[in-house]
Amino acid sequence: MNMRIINLIVFFLLTNIINSNANKDSARVRLDTLQNRSVNTSDFIFLGKLNSIDTINKTLYFKIIEEFKGAIKSDIINIKVKEVTYIDKGLWIVYMNRNADSTYKLNMNGLSRSIIRPERIPVYNFPPPPPLKYETYGLFTYTDKYIDFRITALKDWYVELESLRYYKKNNSKDVKIERFDFKPYFYSSLFCILFCLSLIFYLLFQLRKTNR
C-alpha cells in the first residue's frame, strides 16, 4: 500500500514538472514570434505611463517615458480603444499605429500590456480554475501554478523591455530575444524529488525495523 502511494506521488510530480516546462517553452516560442511581428507591424513603440482613462470616449492618455520606434512630437498621447474594461493605470509597453486621420490606435497584432497585468496577451495558457469544492490539495496546486504563471509573465515583460532597448540601440530589424533555459530548474527539481524519495524509503525502512 505504501509503495503504491509513493509511486503515485512520483508519477504526479514528474508529470507536473515535465508539463510545466513544456508549456513554458511553447509560450516562449509564441512570444518570440509575436514580439518580432509586433515590432515589424507597428509604427510606434514606447514605454509609457497610463495616467487617465476616458471611459465615455474610450480613450487612454499616456505619458511617454521612453521611445523605441517612431518619433512622437508630444510627451502626452491619447489612443482610442474599443474597450476599456480591465485596463489598469501604470507602466505599459505600447505598440501602436497611426490612422489616416492622424489619430492613434493600438496595434491589434501587438503585445501592448501593463506591468500590472503582463499576462493579458494571446501567448500564455492560464492555469485551470480551482475545483468547486476547495479541497486543500486542489487549492494549493492551483495557487502554486498561478503564482508561477504570473512570475513568468512578469519576467517576460521585463525581458521584452530590455529587448526593445537593444532594438533601438542597434537599429535592428528584429528584437533580440533572451531565451530562458529551464533545464537547470528541471534537473534541480528532479534531484529534489529523488532526495525526498530516498528519505521516504529510509523512514519506511526504519519504521519497519521498529515494528518488528
Image (cartoon, rainbow, N blue to C red):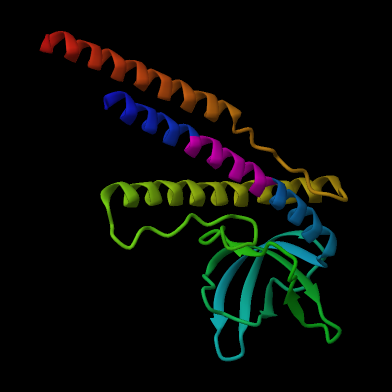
- For image coordinates 59% across by 45% down, the residue present is 23
**Residue 138 belongs to the span the image colors magenta:** no
Residue 204 picture quarter: top left
- For image coordinates 55% across by 73% down, the residue present is 51
- For image coordinates 18% across by 13% down, the residue present is 208
Residue in the foreground of this view, choosing between 12 and 176:
12
Position above or below: 120 against 87: above
Answer with left or right where residue 66 lies relative to residue 168.
left
Q: Quadrant of the N terminus?
A: top left
Residue furthest toward the left?
Answer: 211
* Residues shaded magenta: 15-28
Residue in the foreground of this view, choosing between 81 and 65:
81
Residue in the foreground of this view, choosing between 143 and 166:
143
Residue in the foreground of this view, choosing between 120 and 11:
11
- For image coordinates 32% across by 24% down, the residue present is 3
Q: Position of residue 37 (x, y in %)?
A: 80, 58
Q: Position of residue 119 (x, y in %)?
A: 56, 58
Residue 211 picture quarter: top left
